[in-house]
Amino acid sequence: MIIMVITTKIYNKFQTVIPKEIRKKLNITEDHLVEWYLDERGEVKLKFIENLNFEDMAGIFKSDELTDAVKLKKRSQRGKK
């Protein structure tokens, strides 16, 4: 079931704008990322996910192993696992 149809232009470098109505309805902010899905029928689906930084994730996970928080933060900032 389709609730809303809005058309946007694709600009130079293939950029587009997420319409205001959709941003408001889904509470999308500049901190969100867009995941693009292409299914077997050629239909595109989008999912908006909040981009979490190290501070947002601190305390979410538990482990029995001792960890060095400073090393973990430095590794995460460099994009390493």
Image (cartoon, helix red, strand yellow):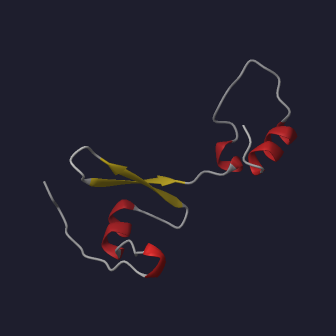
- Spot the residue most to the top: 64
Instruction: Specify the quadrant that holds the C terminus.
Output: top right
Give the side of residue 40 with respect to residue 69, left or right.
left
Q: Nearer the viewer, residue 7 or 29?
A: 7
Marker count (numbered): 0
Which residue is pictured at 31% across the width and 53% down the height? 45
**Above or below 39: residue 65:** above
Name the spot of residue 70 as percent of width and height, x first.
Answer: 86, 41
Which residue is pictured at 48% across the width and 76% down the height? 13
Name the spot of residue 66 as percent of width and height, x first.
Answer: 83, 23
Which residue is pictured at 71% across the width and 49% down the height? 55
**Above or below 59: residue 7:** below
Name the spot of residue 6 as percent of width and height, x first.
Answer: 24, 73
Which residue is pictured at 74% across the width and 42% down the height? 80
Q: Quadrant of residue 16?
A: bottom left
Give the side of residue 59 with respect to residue 78, left or right.
left
Name the spot of residue 33 as percent of width and height, x first.
Answer: 50, 58
